[in-house]
Image: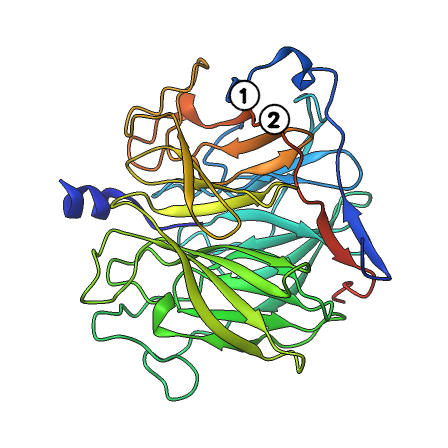
Amino acid sequence: MRAPLRKLVAVAASAVLGVTLVSMAPDSATSATRAKWNTRVFSRVPFPGTPAYVFVHSNGRVYAANYAATGSKSRSRVFEWTAGGTLLRSWTVPGQDLAHSPGVQVANQDARGRLVLLEKSTAGVLTLDTRTGRFQRQATLPDLPLCSTNVRPCSPNATDEKPIPNYATWGADGALYVSDYGQAVIWRIPARGGVPKVWFSSSALDSSLGFGTTGLVYQASTRSFLIAQQTVADLLANPTSGRLYRLGVASTGRPGALRTLWTSKPTDLPDGFGIGRSGRIYIANVGLTNQLVVLSPTGKELERFPKSAGSGRNGSPVPFDGPSNATFLGTRVLVANQSPIAGDRTHHVILDVEVGERGVPNRVPAVSTLR
């Protein structure tokens, strides 16, 4: 989930017991007949469009939701597709604040199979039981004071933003960790539910332009989190360049040292990402470059698709237009297309991109049930 990109245009002119590993096999349209980077339209996303993330569930279904366009007062819906891209059903999200821009991201699942939803207008963390259609509010992220001591440190150029839950991943302890697009912190919600607490805060997660912290994935193999940052507030850095960080976790469960793996090109706005079994990282740039970037496990940039920045021409009927994630399904990645600048509803689709390798399975600890 992210702020409108018009501002940027102006600036730019299982190894662990009790863990479910969600790994989906490809559908009948396998990679056997597809070259690397072959791109197809998986499905169009119904009104008001603007998908922000695509989630592949252990039940074999694919889920995404409306991260409503700026100015839209329509309630968000959660959609369910088959692995082949057939739309099956949808649910309307209750309790959204339509006085603000509503929006939902399907971020994960819990051990009971419920979808974990992040809702923008109320800063809420919800679950949806797709068997019963029941929504349940699990937590609300607090609005933190800017530059508060030991809670929300900031740099001189930081902006005072409201909480915006953005991406969510399960930690080794079964707790849910949530990135905050607005407040330069990572939240922790206990495995079986409870009040969200600030687990990590850093001025490195601040942004002078309002484009904050996005993708968040826990890697059990390295006992660390990968964190995407769209822009930074460092006065010595290019204000439109983003980062990919690695944050280690100590044996006590506390955050360790934060280090930069990769610095993006100006106006990239790195967003959601997927990790291949090779260790390569496939990260989507929702900014003006409209590309997928492939990084080595150590953060070396290996490849960009398309090679030329800006046009988003991927060979499919719909170009990359604000691609905001890369979720593995077999040997492909599913990419949500937001069209955040033009707002072109014909571009509000999920794209299916062949990458030639399988992804690391999503890790869902058995204790991760919230309430």
Which residue is situated farthest in the bottom direction here?
149
Quarter of the figure with residue 370: bottom right
Label 1 SS: loop
Per the image, the residue denoted by label 1 is 36
Which residue is situated farthest in the right direction here?
17
Quarter of the figure with residue 92: top right
Q: Is residue 150 left or right of residue 21?
A: left
Quarter of the figure with residue 6: top left
Whole-percent x, y for residue 256 in the image: 53, 76
Mark 1 and mark 2: Cα distance apart in space: 6 Å
Whole-percent x, y for residue 330 in the image: 69, 30
Label 2 SS: loop
Which circle marks residue 356 in the picture?
2
Q: Amino acid at mark 2?
A: Gly
Q: Is residue 138 left or right of residue 300?
A: right
Crowding around mark 1 (Cα neighbors within 10 Å: few <14, some 14 to 19, many 20+) is: few
Q: Nearer the viewer, residue 173 or 74?
A: 173
Specify how the rendered protein is coloured. Answer: rainbow
Whole-percent x, y for residue 307 in the image: 34, 26
Crowding around mark 2 (Cα neighbors within 10 Å: few <14, some 14 to 19, many 20+) is: some
**Residue positioned 69% across, 18% down in the render:** 30
